[in-house]
Amino acid sequence: MRFRVFQNLTTARFKASHQSRIRTADRTRPGLVPGLCFSGSALATGPLAGTQTHLRENPLNPPLRDAKPSVALYWDFENLHASLSEARLGEGSYGKPDGRFRTQEPLIEVQAIVELAASFGPIAINRAYCNWQFFGRYRDVLLQNAMELIQLFPPGASTKNGADIRLCLDAADDIARHTHIGTVVIVSGDSDFMPLAQKIRAGGRTLVGIGTRASTNRHWARSCNTFRYYEDLMEAAGVAAPPAAD
């Protein structure tokens, strides 16, 4: 008789402990709904292993593995603009104070590049780095494409604006935090992005580069999974190339 009472008490305590663990799991497991079936690994181990079948993934917060891979598009905007400007006005012309620190004419066919990036998947990040105080004439096309603009002031008249460093830091952080990013597109011909290329490929992402023939570093182009020259994009889009400098 005493043994049966002891057995009943032990069973009751076991059930109470089990229910307490279930309630704790309901409160602590993100993305799970209590009272429904969960097709995944059990929360408990030992005698309770495999018993947590009352939970399922929340359809309002689906796991990222089910999401379609998206695209992160990064622009070293002034790098491309400077390349196109020097193709028109001559090599070294943009680097002069009267060529760089003045209102810039729109030269980049932004829409064509955005459409290329969108061909790899939905664009989740569209971020451009530049000293924007001289690029106001790009305003309409930048707004139309919902571009996030990062302002970078150069520390001196003859120094770079640091866009490559900031872009590398942001891109490395984005691909580490956002697992839905499957393709990274970088608009630049700068070889400074080669270490970033190695990190992107090591993370299993596809890297696409875009730059002009005259200014793109060949090693940077080879470090990308795919590299598209700006001139080829314009030809495919039916856009006439700007007249070359005399």
Image: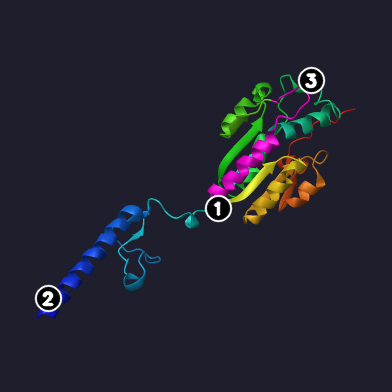
Q: Earlier in the sequence, mark 2 or mark 3?
A: 2
Q: Which amino acid lies under the numbered mark 2 shown in the image of this protein?
A: Val
Picture quadrant of residue 128: top right
Residue 184's spot in the image, x, y percent?
Answer: 63, 47
Residue at mark 2 to residue at mark 1: CA–CA distance:
59 Å
Is 183 located above or below residue 39 in the figure? above
Q: Using the image as rendered, state which of residue 152 and residue 27 is in the foreground.
A: 27
Is 219 located above or below residue 87 in the figure? below
Instruction: Look at mark 1 in the image and give the residue it sits on.
Output: 69
Residue 153's spot in the image, x, y percent?
Answer: 67, 25
Residue at mark 2 to residue at mark 3: CA–CA distance:
93 Å
155 inside magenta stretch: yes
- Count of numbered circles on the image: 3
Q: Using the image as rendered, state which of residue 85 and residue 242 is in the foreground.
A: 85
Q: Earlier in the sequence, mark 2 or mark 1?
A: 2
Q: Using the image as rendered, state which of residue 21 and residue 139 is in the foreground.
A: 21
Residue 124's spot in the image, x, y percent?
Answer: 55, 43
Q: Which residues are magenta?
A: 154-180
Q: Which mark is residue 5?
A: 2
Is 136 located above or below residue 62 in the figure? above
Q: Which amino acid lies under the numbered mark 3 shown in the image of this protein?
A: Pro
Q: Name the residue: 74% across, 20% down.
A: 101
Disc 1 secondary structure class: loop
Q: Which mark is residue 97?
A: 3
Q: Is residue 33 visible?
A: yes
Q: Name the residue: 30% across, 64% down.
A: 54
Q: Is residue 120 visible?
A: no
In screen coordinates, is 116 left or right of 97? left
Residue 223's spot in the image, x, y percent?
Answer: 75, 51
Q: Which amino acid lies under the numbered mark 1 shown in the image of this protein?
A: Pro
Disc 2 secondary structure class: helix
Picture quadrant of residue 108: top right
